[in-house]
């Protein structure tokens, strides 16, 4: 990688601020909970936590990130995004059992008592659009800098997509012989086993010994949304300027066999290219 640090998290795309005026709704639409926009939420960026390093913190110069991205320079950016209904359903479940009431409540009510339809159109979709549109706009202006990756594609072809992400961030293709094993170890069954051993969720946000990782049901809607709801949601997003042609929908249920076959196929391609 051409940089010492890789930021992984939720944020509005650096460089978008001066473009926000092109969307009249953007500035007056708040994110419904904190955490969607780490780089602009007033953190102490002089002491940004670091993992997998001999030191605990590093300074992040947000104005420099903004300026470079606005000009199409600086570190490359990737947005991995889920289809909006799947993301909303996942976050709806995730927040219901959150130990912080900022997330587990909705307009003064327990989120678990709020119909999914209300949450989706009043909070989930506006927040989704606000974040997504920033990356969409920068990707259109600087396609060599910003790459958009559907989560559904990542789930279907994990090794190939992760390789593409790393190649984009590195600026050139590279052969990574350990990547196949890394992707295999990152499967949800393995992460769930780690949580069970630790006795807590990996992200530390669950009550008790709960986990926000779920097996199966990659679509993630649990029957909460039908075709009419999906059509209404797509209309709303298009009206906000989201290019809904970029959205991919799940048509698969990953399993151990699925992951093994996908990675074996990709390993064959890599071995052939290496020769």
Image (cartoon, grey):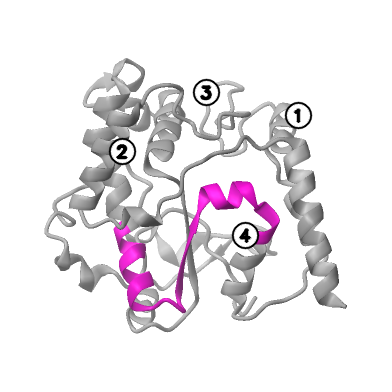
Q: Give residue 249's position: percent from left, percent from top.
A: 46, 43
Between discs 3 and 1, the one toward the N terminus:
1
Q: Give residue 254's position: percent from left, percent from top.
A: 66, 37
Question: Is residue 266 rendered to the left or right of residue 84?
Answer: right
Q: Which residues are magenta?
A: 133-161
* Disc 2 target residue: 124
* Disc 1 target residue: 197
Q: Is residue 160 magenta?
A: yes
Find out whether the residues at labels 1 and 2 contact each other: C-beta distance under 8 Å.
no
Between discs 1 and 2, the one toward the N terminus:
2
| Up-down relation of residue 248 to residue 42 (above or below) | above
Q: Does residue 23 appear in this view?
A: yes
| Up-down relation of residue 20 to residue 200 (above or below) | below
* Disc 4 target residue: 161
| Circle number at residue 207 | 3
Rendering quarter of residue 26: bottom left
| Up-down relation of residue 66 to residue 177 (above or below) | below
Please tell me how crowded label 4 is: few (under 14), some (14-19), or many (20+) other residues with Cα within 10 Å: some
For image coordinates 59% across by 52% down, the residue present is 154
User: Which circle, 2 or 3, is nearer the viewer?
Assistant: 2
């Amino acid at each position: 990688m051409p940089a010492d640090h890789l930021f992984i998290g939720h944020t509005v795309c650096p460089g978008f601020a001066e473009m926000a005026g092109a969307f009249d709704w953007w500035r007056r639409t708040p994110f419904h909970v904190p955490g969607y926009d780490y780089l602009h939420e007033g953190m102490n960026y002089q002491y940004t936590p670091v993992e997998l390093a001999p030191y605990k913190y590093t300074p992040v110069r947000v104005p420099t990130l903004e300026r470079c991205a606005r000009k199409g320079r600086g570190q490359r950016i990737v947005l991995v995004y889920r289809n909006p209904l799947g993301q909303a359903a996942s976050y709806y479940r995730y927040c219901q059992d959150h130990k912080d009431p900022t997330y587990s409540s909705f307009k003064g009510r327990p989120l678990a008592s709020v119909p999914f339809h209300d949450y989706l159109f009043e909070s989930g979709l506006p927040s989704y659009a606000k974040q997504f549109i920033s990356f969409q706009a920068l990707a259109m202006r600087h396609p060599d800098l910003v790459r958009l990756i559907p989560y559904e594609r990542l789930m279907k072809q994990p090794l190939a997509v992760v390789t593409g992400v790393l190649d984009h961030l590195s600026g050139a293709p590279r052969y990574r012989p350990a990547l196949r094993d890394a992707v295999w170890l990152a499967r949800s069954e393995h992460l769930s086993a780690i949580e069970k051993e630790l006795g807590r969720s990996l992200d530390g946000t669950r009550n008790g010994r709960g986990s926000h990782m779920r097996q199966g049901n990659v679509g993630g809607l649990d029957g909460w949304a039908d075709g009419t709801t999906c059509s209404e949601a797509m209309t709303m997003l298009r009206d906000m300027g989201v290019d809904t042609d970029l959205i991919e929908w799940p048509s698969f249920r990953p399993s151990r066999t699925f992951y093994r076959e996908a990675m074996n196929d990709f390993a064959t391609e890599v071995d052939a290219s290496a020769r």
